[in-house]
Amino acid sequence: MNTLELKSIAELRNMAFYIPAYQRGYRWTQRQVKDLLKDIFEFSEKKEDAGIYCLQPLVVVKRTISESLIDESSIMEKIRKTDKLSEVRRILEASKEQWEVVDGQQRLTTIRLILEVLEYPRFYELEYETREDSAKFFLSGIRKILSEIESQSFDSKPEDNIDYYHIKQAVKLICKWREGKDTTRFLNFLLNQVKFIWYEIHEENNPKEVFTRLNIGKISLTNAELIKALLLNKSNFDTEDYSKVRLQQQEIAMEWDVIEYSLQFKEFWLFLNKPGSESPTRIDFIFDLICQEDMLQCKSTMDKEEMQISDDLKTFRYFNHFLETQKQKEKALQTIWEKVKEIFQTLQEWFNDKELYHYIGFLICAGKTVNEIYQKWTGYATKSVFREKYLIGAIKQSIRYKDIENTVYEVDAESSQDIKGGNKRNCLSILLLHNLQTVINQNKVLAENRKYNEGVFYKFPFHLYKSEGWDVEHIDSNTENQLNDIRSQREWLLNAYFGLQGEKFKEIKDNIEKFFKEFTGKNYEQNEDPDKQNTRNERFEELRSTIDDINGNIRLSQTEKNKIWNFALLDSSTNRSYGNAIFPAKRRVIIGKDQGKRFLPSTVDENGKIVNCEVQEGQSSFIPPCTKSVFLKYYNDASSEPNTWNKEDAKAYMNNIKVTLKEFLS
């Protein structure tokens, strides 16, 4: 099992590191070296009790050195420099092993160079697999560079060895940076307060594969991976019994995997988050929540400056600090893990409850954070109190224009009673909530029917709603389609033709057929002159007027077209697919998208004969339930006319919105 701890630079003394061939050599620029020096120096100067400065992870794997490769002269030199028996033992022990550096070698090398310049030579060993003389270069080459700089005979020409060139440039920069500074305090801080996140991977892992993931794939170790190694460290368990420790570790690891797997489920993740917030590990979301809300109550004992540095590691540092400051490590571990499970179970409850899912999902879409909602949740004794005291009120506050009957969007109000609602997207929250409450009500009705045992029949798919671009779309086109072209006239009349059922409509249907025979065919369309066009338009308007009279259609005015009764939710791809089309064309496209079909419009052949529509395989889209009901004329049970969206349809639709959302519009 991978292990993790914070290791100070002082703790690296006399250790041996091996840089394998699969890594590139030292490539840090002078700018990168300068930035690191500046950050550490400024942090060390801020106050006497400055906290730790946390470096990025140093990922290592242990490798044993064969007896034939042990450098005895180097070992003896280190022993001569100490008078402590414990240090001699450590030097001898360290001489038998090396640490293969999987990630972090650039910083590790830079720290070694800084120590060389500050007269701490050979603090730890660095050996490059691809450079047989690399160890000797760090032993004598850097001394030579320092001597050249001191005598001002430094040659900055590129070396044959690109690694050595970058090392020389770094040493030159460090020497220049040191000039005029008292580095005593800096050195003490560097050795004792600057710490690597020491991440030791188990020998069963392939170091090269880990390196590929971290560097070539550019997928850094996440806070969650670091925290997992931190929590499962055997030092957190009170027992010395390895089998018991292993059992406890496996139990946490299994629960961890269940949580991670659940959060990888797209429907669950996008209920809580926006698209684009994905990360390789998603349990970070819970750890971030604990850190941001200080649920372990330990921020007051943390150094403020420490919390601001390396922001991407803030969550890891939070949990590391909590564990470090607790005397009873196993109890601290249990506190952390119980809090993680408690939050996860709450998120699951939200997701599985038909009301909580839709109401909380709505608030998240409206801009509320999971953090805020969770804090409110913990403040109420029961779910019903949470609903009544928080959810309903928060949803009400998110709706800006509650007088939906008199709010006009996009255009100037004509009446003194009208309220100017601005951009039509301002009514998106009402349209979304109408869909959500409709789904909730449908689930309640089905659940009350005794022959059904399921608790939830249908949930609004927030993952689709958030993944696709959504528009507030006019049901009846805002820009009047004058129906001057033959194709629009043909589709309008064809829809009317199929909608007029019964013997009493035979005469008007015969007149529609005559229209098609007279004004159809390539020969006619290619030779249509202005006179013929005027005749066609006149004949069409006569037919249209007669059909409107039959159906009792009252068209919406321009102002009325910009009220909520003429708006519905649609994904942008469906919206673009029909543009400023007439109502029956929109209806045809939406029904097709809902079924994953492409319904081509009924047409007329060269002889003026009606040809029924052709059905092709098409791309399906999620059509919100209320949008579907609008185009199926569901809200107006007295309407049998599929050709237009008239005032009676609009009134019925708005009345349904008002009844469905009465709890929120008051």
Image: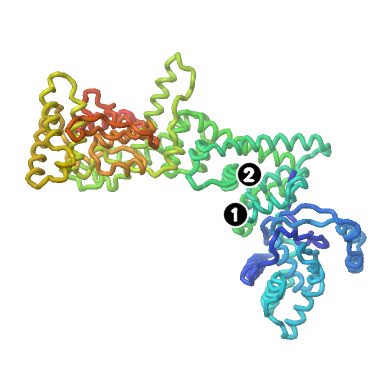
> What residue does disc 1 label?
312
Does the residue at mark 1 contact the one at mark 2 (Cβ under 8 Å)?
A: no
Please tell me which of labels 1 and 2 falls first in the chain: 2
Residue 473 position within the rendered picture, expressed as x and y whole percent measured from the top left: 30, 41
Is 492 located above or below residue 442 in the figure? below
Residue 296, label in figure: 2
Q: Residue 303: x, y in percent?
A: 64, 57
Q: Which colour assignment does the render follow?
A: rainbow
> Front-most of 501 and 43?
501
Of tags 1 and 2, which is closer to the observer?
Answer: 1
Residue at image point 71% right, 74% down: 160
In the picture, measured across the screen, residue 386 lies left or right of residue 108, that is: left
| SS for callout 2 | loop
Give the quadrant of the N terminus: top right
User: For numbered disc 1, what is the local secondary structure?
Assistant: helix
Amino acid type, residue under disc 1 in the picture: Asp
